[in-house]
Image (cartoon, helix red, strand yellow):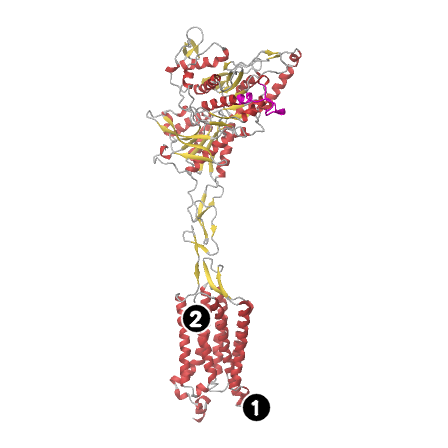
């Protein structure tokens, strides 16, 4: 800190100026500060620092003469009660035969007037002592004070600990809460009976989390207490995903323009909760402006530094500060303190001048001569010292809510227990080098620090007192609520408690029914930048704003969020999909072309219809098997072609229904063999047509002997057998199997048959395509043969339809999702089958059934036309 180098320089000059004195063998006090204090002699002295006055009046500096002493004003009787509590604790210890027997404790207390300079002067006076001179240059005997209770403020505690810590002087503060003081390397001899701000901040954040206040304002004082607390608070808020809407510093000089700026920020902000880390003195101007601006729609959260301050408990502040929630140090009870406070009497000892100041302020009198004296503009009566304190009603005699005073009490007892444990050491079993114990006659401050670190006792009120490795007390807080009293003023009620749980987590216990809310709804206010995102949505941060300001975007298909305010949506597992509300993963719908599906019913009907037509044609052909048109071009091939077409129609049924291993293996095999049988029959019929035409010419009379019935059957069987071999090899090496496809349609599981081997399936299709191409080519070449019933024309047309269907099938199949891909394949099978059936057999059935006169040999050969 900035004060440290100046202090070190000051001490250095004092050492130089004292060199000549040291040569004489006597140490002499170089000067004495004029300080207000209280004193009681004893074998061992405890020091104390309290801010009994609110303000300090500085003298005018001429830089020509030594400045006049600082003057403190506005006496604080509540703080004086804390000083008296230290005196009471010392007296109580002296009367206790079980604690420090044969040792009488004394105390020397100073008022720091809420000023760093005065606090430091008081601390130096305590550490160096008040004796005018001493001749023992070996520094034997106990130190002037064995420990100091105080300072109550963080900034003076930092400065004092920076210097006195070098000498390991124990300092036990009852009210300094800055988290920076937990640094054991910087402040090795600093302890406190009040929890660190780090715990206070966690406790306050727990309250904010409990009520869902994620968007809050922050106001803090411009000192170490406020700055460090604000830093910790913002870090803790960020840790839990909460945000600080604004952060404002209370000015040191109470500048009205700065105060108006802060109130304007509070008024303009959407945050309805304002957290304040400050002492009462810094906060008073802001609250006056809040009253002036009539700002009544805010929920205030008070830090322990002002949560119990009586300054704001007047009816004037009720409409604005009523309902305030505050953190306060644990309240305690001290038996006998009230009577001790009432027994106080002033003395003429200058070292106890602070008692006289208290007396004058309490009874509006003066110890000056002349009966009545003038103090500024106000006349005061003469004090007798016999006035009755029991007739007064001030915070001094109120012991119903001892908080800071209770901490003072615990601090004194902590030092006393440490000293007691030091004296109980058995020689040869001590904790210091060589197993030595400390010597009370030649006590070193660092020796008491060792025992202070290990202090462990329970107060008469039942509270456990000990220090952690950083010198901090066990964290426990009361949660206070400012409620209206019958006279319109504010009364404080305890509505909960916050204490340390597992690890560093703070556990909050609240009686919500006992809390007074200063709003029309009588309910806690809402204080969020954005409303919570419900399940099924996620947060999307607004650009340039804190994380608490966001929009709620619905999760994408296949993703869910099952919590409120989800940052990211969760992707559902492979076999699950998001429900319509996007808050739960449900099993995906398993899709396949079923017989119950309208599309499946339509295709099944078409397949059975084609099968029935084939059967009907076979019946017609069987009934007219001896007619020329049936016998032409080998009737066996016609029946074989009808049988293969019937198989083609029926194989489509294998593609419908839930895929199973046997249906997956059969569907493509039956499809491939059926179509090869069909096309090979057509190919042979085409070859027969060409052979018949050539045999009608002289040069080709022997052509038909190579295309007899036996050769036709063998050709069809051989061509079909090749496809059977391809299917057998394919099914034996990598047969198709049922497969759950999660990729083609992300929202469904498409239950389909995987083809197993791409090469096997490709060879099956390629072979069908090859036969179809050869058939089409031969039929096309034979289309103009001079036969009256030239079947090659119909074969050409049928193969043209077949090829067109399967060429169109490829892009349609690839672009069709799920079960529709299977439907496209079935449609291609049925369309090509119907094309072959109609193109080849419809003309013959037309003649057989409607024009039987043309079903003669002459009509077929075209001779009737020639005869006519």
Circle 1 sits on which residue? 699
Residue 640 appears left or right of 316: right
Range covered by the magenta-colored residues: 418-439
Quick one: 775 or 407, which is closer to the camera?
Answer: 407
Instruction: Please say whether residue 421 is one of the residues in the magenta stretch.
Output: yes
Residue behind mark 2 = 653
Whether 80 is drawn above or below 268: the answer is above
Residue 220 vs 670, above or below: the answer is above
Q: Tell me: residue 250, above or below residue 730.
A: above
Q: Nearer the viewer, mark 1 or mark 2?
A: 2
The one nearer the camera, 284 or 329, is 329
Q: Which mark is residue 858?
A: none
Is residue 219 visible to the viewer in this orientation of the structure? Answer: yes
Task: Give the residue displayed 50% in from the left and 67% down from the top.
Answer: 811
Helix or strand or loop: what does disc 2 sit on?
helix
Q: Where is residue 692 in the image (x, y as percent from the top left)?
A: 51, 87
Q: How far apart are marks 1 and 2 (CA)?
A: 50 Å
Which part of the image, by quadrant, shows the C terminus? bottom left
- On the image, which quarter does residue 65 sit in? top right
């Amino acid at each position: 800190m900035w004060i440290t180098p100046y202090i070190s320089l000051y001490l250095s000059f004092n050492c130089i100026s004292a060199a000549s004195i040291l040569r004489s063998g006597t140490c002499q006090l170089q000067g004495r500060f004029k300080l207000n204090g209280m004193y009681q002699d004893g074998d061992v002295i405890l020091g104390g620092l309290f801010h009994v006055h609110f303000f300090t009046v500085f003298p005018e500096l001429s830089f020509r003469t030594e400045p006049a002493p600082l003057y403190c004003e506005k006496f604080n009787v509540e703080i004086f009660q804390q000083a008296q509590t230290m005196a009471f604790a010392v007296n109580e210890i002296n009367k206790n035969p079980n604690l420090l027997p044969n040792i009488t404790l004394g105390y020397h207390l100073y008022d720091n007037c809420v000023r760093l300079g005065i606090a430091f002067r008081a601390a130096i006076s305590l550490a160096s002592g008040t004796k005018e001179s001493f001749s023992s240059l070996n520094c034997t005997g106990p130190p002037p004070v064995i420990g100091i209770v105080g300072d109550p403020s963080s900034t003076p505690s930092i400065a004092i600990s920076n210097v006195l810590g070098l000498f390991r002087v124990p300092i036990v503060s009852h009210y300094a809460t800055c988290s920076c003081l937990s640094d054991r390397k910087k402040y090795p001899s600093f302890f406190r009976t009040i929890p660190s701000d780090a715990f206070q901040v966690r406790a306050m954040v727990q309250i904010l989390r409990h009520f869902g206040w994620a968007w809050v304002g922050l106001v803090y004082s411009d000192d170490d207490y406020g700055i460090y607390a604000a830093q910790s608070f913002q870090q803790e808020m960020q840790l839990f995903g909460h945000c600080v809407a604004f952060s404002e510093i209370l000015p040191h000089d109470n500048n009205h323009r700065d105060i108006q700026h802060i109130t304007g920020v509070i008024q303009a902000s959407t945050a309805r909760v304002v957290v304040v880390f400050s002492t009462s003195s810094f906060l008073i101007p802001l609250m006056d402006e809040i009253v002036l601006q009539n700002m009544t729609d805010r929920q205030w959260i008070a830090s322990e530094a002002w949560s119990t301050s009586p300054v704001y408990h007047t009816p004037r502040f009720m409409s604005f500060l009523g309902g305030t929630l505050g953190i306060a140090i644990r309240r305690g009870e001290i038996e006998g303190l009230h009577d001790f406070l009432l027994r106080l009497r002033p003395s003429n000892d200058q070292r106890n001048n602070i008692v006289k100041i208290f007396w004058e302020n309490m009874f509006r009198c003066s110890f000056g001569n002349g009966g009545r004296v003038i103090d500024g503009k106000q006349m005061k009566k003469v004090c007798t010292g016999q006035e009755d304190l029991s007739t007064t009603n001030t915070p001094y005699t109120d012991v119903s809510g001892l908080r800071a005073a209770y901490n003072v009490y615990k601090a004194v007892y902590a030092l006393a227990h440490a000293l007691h444990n030091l004296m109980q050491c058995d020689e040869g079993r001590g904790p210091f080098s060589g197993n030595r114990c400390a010597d009370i006659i030649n006590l070193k401050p660092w020796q008491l620090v060792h025992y202070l670190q290990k202090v462990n006792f329970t107060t008469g009120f039942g509270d456990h007192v000990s220090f952690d490795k950083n010198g901090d007390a066990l964290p426990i807080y009361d949660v206070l609520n400012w409620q209206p009293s019958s006279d319109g003023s504010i009364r404080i009620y305890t509505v909960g408690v916050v204490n340390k749980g597992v690890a560093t987590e703070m556990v909050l216990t609240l009686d919500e029914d006992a809390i007074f809310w200063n709003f029309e709804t009588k309910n806690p206010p809402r204080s969020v930048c954005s409303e919570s995102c419900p399940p099924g949505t996620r947060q999307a941060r607004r650009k340039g704003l804190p994380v608490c300001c966001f929009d709620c975007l619905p999760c994408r298909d296949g993703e869910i969020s099952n919590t409120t305010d989800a940052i990211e949506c969760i992707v559902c597992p492979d076999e699950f999909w998001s429900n319509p509300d996007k808050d739960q993963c449900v099993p995906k719908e398993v899709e396949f072309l079923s017989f119950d599906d309208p599309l499946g019913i339509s295709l099944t009907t078409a397949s059975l219809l084609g099968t029935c037509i084939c059967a009907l044609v076979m019946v017609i052909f069987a009934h007219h098997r001896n007619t020329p048109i049936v016998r032409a071009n080998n009737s066996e091939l016609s029946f074989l072609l009808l049988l293969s077409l019937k198989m083609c129609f029926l194989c489509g049924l294998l593609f419908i229904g839930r895929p199973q291993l046997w249906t997956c293996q059969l569907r493509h095999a039956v499809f491939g063999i059926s179509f090869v049988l069909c096309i090979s029959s057509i190919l042979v019929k085409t070859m027969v047509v060409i052979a018949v035409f050539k045999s009608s010419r002289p040069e080709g009379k022997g052509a038909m002997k190579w295309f007899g019935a036996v050769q036709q059957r063998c050709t069809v069987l051989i061509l079909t057998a090749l496809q059977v071999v391809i299917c057998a090899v394919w099914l034996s090496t990598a047969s198709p199997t049922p497969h759950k496809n999660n990729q083609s349609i992300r929202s469904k599981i498409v239950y389909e048959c995987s083809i197993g081997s791409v090469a096997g399936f490709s060879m099956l299709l390629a072979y069908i395509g090859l036969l179809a191409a050869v058939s089409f080519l031969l039929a096309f070449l034979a289309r103009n043969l001079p036969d009256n019933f030239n079947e090659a024309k119909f074969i050409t047309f049928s193969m043209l339809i077949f090829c067109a269907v399967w060429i169109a099938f490829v892009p349609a199949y690839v672009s069709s999702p799920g079960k529709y891909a299977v439907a496209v394949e079935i449609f291609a099978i049925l369309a090509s089958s119907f094309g072959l059936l109609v193109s080849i057999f419809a003309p013959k059935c037309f003649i057989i059934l409607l024009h039987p006169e043309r079903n003669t040999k002459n009509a077929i050969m075209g001779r009737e036309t020639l005869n006519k």
